[in-house]
Image (spheres, coloured by chain):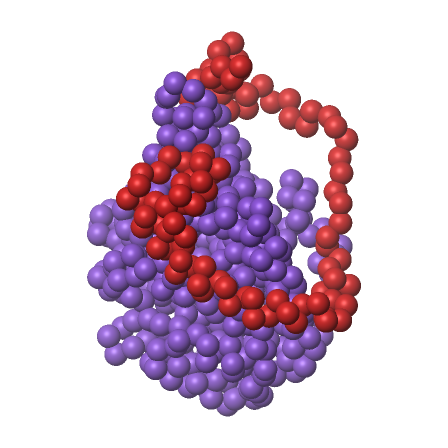
Chain colours: A red, B purple
Amino acid sequence: MDITEIKKLANLSRIDIKDDEAKAMAQDFDAILAYVDQIKEVSEEIGNKDESITDKENYFLYNIMREDEVANNDKGKREDILKNAPDTQDGFIKVKQIL
Amino acid sequence: MEINLRELTISKAHQLLIDQKIKVKDLVDVYLGEIKEKNKDINAYLEIYNNLDEQIEKAQELIDSGGATLLTGIPIAIKDNILYKGQIASASSLILENYVATYDSFVVERLKDEGVIFLGRTNMDEFAMGSSTETSAFGVTKNPHDISRVPGGSSGGSASAVAGDMALVALGTETCGSVRQPASFCGLVGLKPSYGAVSRSGIIAMGSSLDQVGPMAKTVEEVEIVFKAISKYDKKDSTSIPEEKRDIEKKPLKKKIGIPREFLESGGIDKAVLNNFEETCQKLKSLGYEIVDISLPILKYSLAVYYIIMPAEVSSNLARYDGIRYGLSIDADNLFDVYAKSRASGFGKEVRRRILLGTYVLSHGYYDAYYNTAIKVRKMIKDEINKAFLDIDAFITPTVPFLPFKLGEKLNDPVSMYLCDIFSAPANLANIPAITIPSGKTNEGLPFGVQITAPFLREDVLFQIGKDIESLQ
């Protein structure tokens, strides 16, 4: 990991980063990636696995749908939500111009 | 009347309350007295709620009208990432410092119905990322057993509150050990429920495929009471398990517990911790348990798998903090800079590190090598564990490989901090329940803990074995 790579990730993550922090972070990344790289030892076995018994038992994984209707008509809630917004106008959250 | 908080449990407090020997206000006042005296040193609580009178009145009415449950009037602390309508929930982060919850989390709603008293919100590692409560933006929390040491984390404030008699019980959350590890470091019982047993609605998300809310208390019985109150189906959490699917066949115990020996040996365990663990296993044999070594070599990859899946989920979940809709916002000339400056100022170092790490393992060119491989190994881990459970009731390990460490000791070495959770990871990855039970203390008074891990939805196994371990102390 080098500073350029860290800065690219910071940019993708929308987080400003200074050079000295990027340098320290690159070192942390090297240590963390060296640790997690051990999963590569098992990745070869993965191809020859039998069918997963967990999949069969995974009975609580299924799609959950609902009608596309407004579920909450509590007017007070809208006020509460807007109170947490940094900038509002006419009952809306105000965003910087993007075009 | 004098109340001995050290010996107090939910059942004892309930009896005193329904016999009208004490009022809810008396009980709350005793805890507030302890908080006033100790919290300035321990920093377990970030805030005591301003609506205690109202809560006390409601609970007392329930008791006086004969409508009390075991939890009515019980003073409880909640972690700062659990939403309580009208109160701040900051996840101990500057980015949410002034965020006021606009709705109740499911767990708060459930406990409100029972008339518990929410005393306040407790300190935690920022966004639950840490194992020592040192990454909080609002100061470190100390271990009541030795204030030069960490309480564990990320739910360190909740654990310290109960261990310091500043709450009777507490709620924490965990993504990988954040209830069990601080409970163990503070000499408490702590439960990580089966994934989907407790709703995640209203919990500030970290790793959504791993997160669960869990109770902490001095005894197994109390953890069981709180768990039963919050473990209900919730339609607002699509991964919440419907009631009819919870009703599984519960085979009686074989009284056979496995020790995953290779996994244990990969954990870098302190000698004192290992000795305490072996002693506890020996004592369990005296209660008629068969303790056998089992081979689950795949478990040693759990933490590595976790440190790929978790950051990936973190980087997605924390994208919502953009300085636009809520939270800290730093003004800038253009939208990109509002995002980048708000997130740089609002997130602490560990949070920024994990977001970047998650972005890396999900990025083009690395996705297959890291994220995709990790989810396959996760499935293998689940499979191997589920196979092992065909022969044993549960497996046992120490909860943490070492004793509570000194403040600052591991803060600048991320990998060594991450290794705190090496024995925690399998339960979160495999969606199964696990519990930590106190198993004695060192001569200096530092607590030991052992961990029991059971099959999916078999919290009852944990409570049964847990009570047996408790009886040995």
**Near-viewer residue (B137 or B262):** B262
Name the residue located 46 percent from the left edge and 80 percent from the top edge. B265
Q: Work out whether B418 lies above or below B18.
A: below
Name of the residue lying farthest toward the top: A90
Name the residue located 61 percent from the left edge and 63 percent from the top edge. B378
Classify residue B355 as left or right of residue B201.
Answer: left
**Near-viewer residue (B104 or B318):** B318
Q: Is residue B337 visible?
A: yes
Q: Work out whether B407 lies above or below B285.
A: above
Numbered circles on residues, count: 0
Name the residue located 30 percent from the left edge and 57 percent from the top edge. B411
**Near-viewer residue (A11 or B256):** A11
Q: Work out whether B316 lies above or below B449.
A: above
Residue A75 image offset from top left, x and y in percent: 58, 19
**Near-viewer residue (B385 or B60):** B385
Classify residue B225 as left or right of residue B153.
Answer: right
Residue B140 image offset from top left, x and y in percent: 28, 51
Rendered-image quadrant of the N terminus of chain B: bottom left
Rendered-image quadrant of the C terminus of chain B: bottom left
Q: Is residue B15 visible?
A: no
Residue B447 image offset from top left, x and y in percent: 34, 71
